[in-house]
Amino acid sequence: MSNTKILVTRQWPTGPQERLAASHDVTFRAPDTTMSHDEFMAAAKEYDVIMPTVSDKIPAEFYPAAKGKVKILASYGVGYNHIDVEAARANGIAVTNTPDVLTDCTADLAMGLLLAAARRIGEGERETRAGKWEGWRPTHMIGKKVTGATIGIVGFGRIGQAMARRAHFGFGMKVVFQDAWNVPDDIKAANGNAEQLGSIEEVAAASDFLSLHCPGGDATFKLINADIFKAMKPGCILVNSARGDVVDEDALFDALDAGTLTAAGLDVFMGEPALDPRFLKYENLVLAPHLGSATDGTRDAMGHRAIDNMEAFLKGDTPGDLVS
Ligand code: DGY
């Protein structure tokens, strides 16, 4: 058992929690809620390692307060927009995340949202459960055909590529995408013969479905705004399994009202878990509570990956997933 004091901010799956407990001086914080400002400030003086999650927004005052005490934020999750990476670096705090292990499950969920929004599965389920189903008829709950349609992907990293493969090889979809990096031909070929376009507007104009896979944070805040909705091919369906703040929600509701946007499948929201009440008004929205990585295998693997990163750091090695 090492002397390093570790704080785990949320309840983890049993496997990685037991692994941590077996060989470290670890505090598993209870209750299973997001860390408050005061808790972070107290933790800054008490722990050598903090293992936060994507829902623990770390306050700006934490970093200078933690300088010299907290050595690493070994975060559980791939996204790290809850951490000010520059401030961490400036105060000598390493940051790691848990990529790769959640790629497939997040892309699976995005595909599920796309199908549910296109084929009106949420709406149909509500009708069936309410006892309002009047039986099969040729004009009942007509959706949008997925097979053979064009999908536009914003952000062609691991999860964007995994979504492209599902769409192309599973559903015969044509794939176009936008990303800031110039994607090499072999990667485009391996991921559904995807075609890179010059801007999000071009991708939106070409796509029957637009799926977001870019990181959150300042650089992508309200990236999908009124201009993008205006550029969209009429009848487009939006899927967001990235971060809520990537979408300007006022512009989204305007696009739904105008009919430019036919439907949307959303796993993430601005200011979640609080939800703008307007979301509940639209039958053509499929709403999920940030479930992208929520499978037994993946959530276990994320915990083990966070521990691997932390243990490598404590041994003096460079962690596999060092962000900063
Ligand atoms: C992440 O890891 O960033 C996801 O949003 C939650 O798994």
Image (cartoon, rainbow, N blue to C red):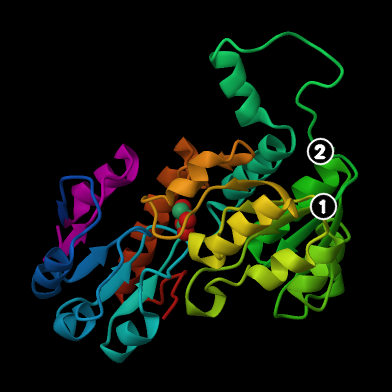
Tell whether 210 sits left or right of 83: right
Residue 196 position (above or below residue 150): below
Regarding residue 252, the answer to whether it shows in the image is: yes
- Name which residue lies at 43% across and 52% down: 276
Regarding residue 288, the answer to whether it shows in the image is: no
Q: Which residues are the magenta region?
A: 1-25
Q: Marks 2 and 1, how far apart in space?
A: 9 Å
The kind of residue tagged 1 is Asp
Residue sitting nearer the eye, 229 or 268: 229
In the picture, the quarter occupied by the C terminus is bottom left
The kind of residue tagged 2 is Lys
In the rendered image, which residue does mark 2 sit on?
A: 144
In the rendered image, which residue does mark 1 sit on?
A: 208
Q: Earlier in the sequence, mark 2 or mark 1?
A: 2
In the current view of this chain or complex, which residue is farthest to the bottom? Answer: 90
Tell whether 183 sits left or right of 253: right
Q: Are marks 2 and 1 in contact (CB under 8 Å)?
A: yes
Q: Tell me the quarter of the picture where residue 48 sits.
A: bottom left
Q: Tell me the quarter of the picture where residue 92 sits.
A: bottom left
> Residue 19 colored magenta?
yes
Residue 94 position (above or below residue 275): below
Q: Tell me the quarter of the picture where residue 246 sits.
A: bottom right
- Name which residue lies at 69% across and 32% down: 120
- Numbered badge on residue 177: none
Question: Which secondary structure, mark 2?
Answer: loop
Tell whether 258 sits left or right of 247: right
- Name which residue lies at 83% across and 73% down: 197
Pointer 2 residue Cβ closer than 8 Å to ligand 1: no
Q: Position of residue 72 (x, y in %)?
A: 28, 73
Question: Which secondary structure, mark 1?
Answer: loop
